[in-house]
Image (spheres, grey):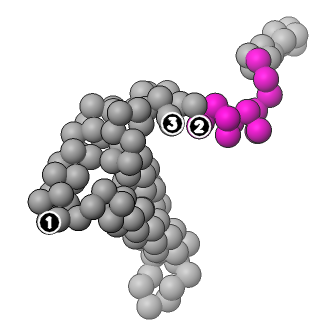
Amino acid sequence: MHGIPWDMIDQLARRFTDHDTALGLSPQEQWSLQVLKIAEETGEAAQAVIGARGTNPRKGTSPWDDAHAEVADVVITALVTLARMRPDDAAEYLDRHLAVKSAKFLPAGPAPVPAPAEPA
């Protein structure tokens, strides 16, 4: 799996923070609006899934690639949000949080190595 390009995420976070600061928004206002942006992107992903499933007869169908792109937008927006909220340690915070969350679902220790297949 590829690593998260935190340098690019941090650049986007700084860009949006600078813009919102110039508008006179407090950090908490900026964070609130950024979380709402995640919700907006999530809605667009939901619309893309509805389109891919073809369940809205008024709009027809759209390719699953649209849903993939919208989900990627949700992820990018969420990472930028975390970087804006925690500019000093977003990557480390995410690593720690992921470890805690994944421990609830993944077995402890390394994944078992499957036994070699027996010759036919």
- Please give the residue where the numbered disc 2 appears in the rendered image: 97
- The segment highlighted magenta reads 97-109
Q: Quadrant of residue 118?
A: top right
Inspect the image, locate mark 1, and give the three-letter code of the amino acid beneath it: Leu
Which quadrant, please, contains the C terminus? top right
Q: Residue 108 colored magenta?
A: yes
Identify which residue is drawn at 21% across, 54% down.
16
Badge 2 density bin: few <14, some 14–19, many ≥20, Cα 10 Å: few
- SS assignment at label 2: helix
Nearer to the camera, 8 or 32:
32
Inspect the image, locate mark 2, and give the three-letter code of the amino acid beneath it: His
- SS assignment at label 3: helix
Residue 23's label in the rendered image is 1
Nearer to the camera, 68 or 25:
25
- Please give the residue where the numbered disc 3 appears in the rendered image: 94
- SS assignment at label 1: loop
Q: Quadrant of residue 115?
A: top right
Badge 3 density bin: few <14, some 14–19, many ≥20, Cα 10 Å: some
Nearer to the camera, 34 or 24:
24
Inspect the image, locate mark 3, and give the three-letter code of the amino acid beneath it: Leu
- Outermost residue, left direction? 22
Nearer to the camera, 89 or 50:
89
Q: CA distance from mark 1 to mark 2?
A: 32 Å
Identify which residue is drawn at 52% across, 75% down.
50
Contact? badges 1 and 2 (CB < 8 Å): no
Identify which residue is drawn at 33% across, 65% down.
29
Residue 27 placement (x, y as % from top left): 31, 56
Q: Earlier in the sequence, mark 1 or mark 2?
A: 1
